[in-house]
Image (cartoon, helix red, strand yellow):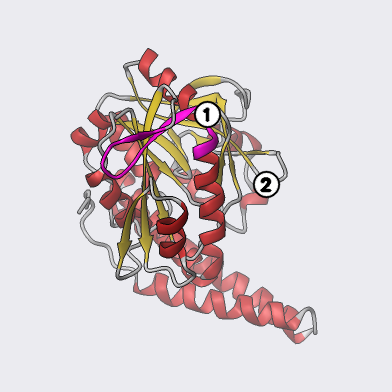
């Protein structure tokens, strides 16, 4: 088996079907659950779908339309990291790929990624060029965030960040269609060697979602592997279709994951200060939305944002400071 593609889905049946169709269109041979190949492509690929108790008919759709997929339906919503770890444990390929269900794999992308890793044995993890739905490039390659980055990136202060700080973080000094080393690539489409998984383990389930791929790439680099961006392999990512179903939880998981990462790699003291800063920033945003609502500006939207920010503030206030360390169960 050359490649195992792991897709964790939750209530995105139509998007998942488009994703599976795009994989099947590629020049690959699809391995059924028993390993029997379907198709005459040179690259033998298995697809593992871990479904997190979807209520939209996802399981029936996969069973009826994609019998070549290895379906792993779960009784509960296991989340992104736990779901991927279940898929990783079941994978048989010499390479493993984490792929979001709201993606479209362009022809030849899988072959190019595998060929690149075959030709570069020191690279342990790689990511493709990713496009938005409208065809523009989605930024998915990164350098490791610094403590200063944490204060600006994805906060209300991002517009005031020093230009060079975010340019470094987003690797804007390299071409979108180039191939080069980076610190980490985003997990919407990420391929790794089986040897990397065996050496460093799976994703840290302390990250429910967000920053889990950052942590995984950092652990891989700490173990001596290179991480690369491969610009001539292309995938479209519609983006955030599962997390759109739970906006407050999206904010909560993002900020809790950020705190976990900086606690692990930059220490408890900085993580404590960062949590205080994030709490203050959400309080400021809550006050701004309240004032705008009182002034009559788009009140339904303001009320929704206020409810979200209240939930986030409560969650951050309760966020514990467990001892850092990997949790890959």
Answer whether residue 266 is magenta in the image.
no
Mark 1, Cα crowd under 10 Å, few <14 / some 14-19 / many 20+, is: many
Would residue 271 be found to the left or right of residue 99 on screen? left
Looking at the rendered image, the disc whose residue lies closer to the viewer, 1 or 2, is 1
Is disc 1 in contact with disc 2, using a CB cutoff of under 8 Å?
Answer: no
| Point 51% across, 54% down: residue | 16
Q: CA distance from mark 1 to mark 2?
A: 17 Å
Which quadrant of the rendered structure holds the N terminus? top left
Q: Is residue 45 or residue 105 the one in the foreground?
A: 45
Decide if residue 73 is in sight here. yes
Looking at the image, is mark 1 or mark 2 earlier in the sequence? 1
Which quadrant of the rendered structure holds the C terminus? bottom left
State how many labels appear. 2
Tag 1 residue:
109
| Point 40% across, 25% down: residue | 43
Question: Is residue 200 placed above or below 314 in the rendered structure?
Answer: above
The stretch of residues the image draws in magenta is 24-38
User: Of all residues shown, which one is farthest toward the right?
Assistant: 296
Helix, strand or loop at disc 2? loop
Tag 2 residue:
133
Would residue 315 be found to the left or right of residue 161 on screen? left
Answer whether residue 34 is magenta in the image.
yes
Would residue 282 be found to the left or right of residue 122 on screen? right
Q: Position of residue 295 (x, y in %)?
A: 79, 84
Q: Position of residue 271 (x, y in %)?
A: 36, 55
């Amino acid at each position: 088996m050359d490649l195992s593609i792991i897709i964790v889905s939750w209530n995105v049946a139509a998007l998942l079907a488009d994703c599976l169709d795009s994989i099947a269109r590629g020049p690959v041979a699809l391995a059924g659950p028993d390993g029997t190949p379907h198709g005459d492509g040179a690259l033998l690929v298995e697809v593992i779908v871990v479904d997190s108790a979807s209520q939209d008919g996802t399981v029936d759709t996969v069973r009826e339309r994609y019998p070549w997929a290895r379906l792993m339906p779960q009784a509960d919503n296991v989340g992104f990291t736990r779901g991927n770890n279940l898929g990783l444990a079941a994978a048989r390929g010499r390479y493993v790929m984490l792929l979001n269900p709201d993606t479209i794999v362009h022809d030849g992308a899988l072959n190019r990624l595998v060929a690149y890793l075959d030709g570069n044995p020191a690279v342990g993890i790689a990511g493709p060029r990713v496009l938005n739905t409208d065809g523009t490039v989605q930024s998915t390659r990164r350098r490791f965030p610094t403590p200063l980055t944490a204060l600006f990136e994805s906060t209300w202060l991002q517009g005031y960040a020093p230009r060079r700080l975010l340019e470094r973080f987003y690797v804007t000094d390299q071409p979108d269609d180039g191939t080069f080393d980076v610190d980490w690539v985003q997990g919407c489409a990420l391929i790794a060697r089986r040897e990397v998984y065996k050496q460093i383990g799976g994703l840290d389930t302390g990250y429910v979602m967000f920053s889990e791929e950052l942590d995984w790439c950092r652990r891989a680099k700490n173990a001596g592997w290179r991480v690369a961006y491969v610009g001539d392999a292309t995938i479209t990512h519609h983006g955030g279709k599962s997390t759109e179903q739970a906006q407050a939880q999206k904010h909560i998981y993002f900020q809790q994951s950020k705190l976990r990462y900086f606690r692990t790699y930059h220490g408890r003291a900085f993580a404590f200060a960062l949590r205080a800063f994030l709490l203050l920033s959400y309080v400021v945003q809550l006050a701004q939305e309240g004032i705008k609502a009182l002034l009559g500006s788009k009140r339904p939207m303001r009320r929704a944002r206020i409810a979200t920010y209240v939930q986030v503030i409560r969650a951050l206030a309760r966020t514990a400071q467990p001892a850092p360390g990997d949790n890959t169960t």
